[in-house]
Image (tube, rainbow, N blue to C red):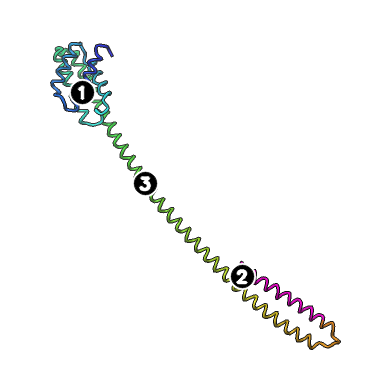
Amino acid sequence: MKPHLALLSRQYQAALLKHLQGRESCAATANWLARRATALRVATLDLARIHERAVAGLPSARGTDRAARRLKSFFNEVNARMLDKQGRDGHGVADLNRLKTALVRRTAQLAAANRELESGIVRRRKVEAALKKSERHDSHLLAASLHIQHGLRKLTHKLLRAQEGKRKIASAKLRDDVAQSLLGVNVHLFSLKKQASAKSRKLASEIASTQRLVSRSKTSIRRAARSDRTA
């Protein structure tokens, strides 16, 4: 920017901010800026560049239709008064028309960008809400799954205990039946041994051997019973 325009640019930005905030009359401020611009022989194009730099330096001034209208009206007011003071030559009017067109286009672009930003915010909020809903649903599913697993473990333990109890009962009954059978065999062998004569020593020896075998079987059964009770 030309040195003689730097001070005017700062003054323009300060006046523009006050206008947006409603602290000063637009007509009085525009008239004062027009006199300054005329004294410096500022052209319409230069004024447009000053206006754009001022808007760029005021982020809070962009983004709403109301602000865009106030920005446009401020520039038009200052430029019209400046051209009036400069005699409104044909060259200045042509520049003004071009700048008005550019300003309308820029205003439309800003409004479109603002709408796109608002649309993006709405989409982001929808996505965040969907994610939170999904997280809550997943938490419920996890809690239900853990509850089911706990129930299945308890049921499995009950089944194992029931099966173990049935096995012990069946084993005890089987041992009792075998013990009763062995007892009967042993009694029968004892009776036969008594009835055996001296001539049948071989038979008596076999009976005694069978009795020893029955005795060892009873011992094994009792040992197995003790093991089941300690298990």
- Which residue is tagged 2? 229
Per the rendered image, the range of residues in magenta is 205-231
Label 3 close to label 1 by CB (< 8 Å): no
The one nearer the camera, 69 or 16, is 16
Q: Nearer the viewer, mark 2 or mark 3?
A: 2
- Helix, strand or loop under label 1: helix
- Which residue is tagged 1? 16
**Which tag, 3 or 1, sits closer to the chain's start?**
1
Alpha carbons under labels 1 and 2: distance apart: 99 Å
Answer with the quarter of the image where residue 184 lies: bottom right
- The structure residue drawn at horizontal position 46% and vertical position 56%, both measured from the top left corner, is 146
Alpha carbons under labels 3 and 1: distance apart: 44 Å
- The structure residue drawn at horizontal position 20% and vertical position 13%, both measured from the top left corner, is 91
Crowd around label 1: few <14 · some 14–19 · many ≥20 (10 Å): many
- The structure residue drawn at horizontal position 53% and vertical position 66%, both measured from the top left corner, is 159
Name the chief secondary structure element in magenta.
helix
* Disc number for residue 132: 3
Of the 4 image quadrants, the one containing the N terminus is: top left
Residue 43 image point, x, y percent:
21, 13
Identify residue type, mark 1. Leu
**Is residue 161 rendered to the left or right of residue 67?**
right
**Which tag, 2 or 3, sits closer to the chain's start?**
3
The one nearer the camera, 61 or 198, is 198
Residue 173 image point, x, y percent:
62, 76
Q: Nearer the viewer, mark 1 or mark 2?
A: 2
Residue 117 image point, x, y percent:
30, 34
Alpha carbons under labels 2 and 3: distance apart: 56 Å
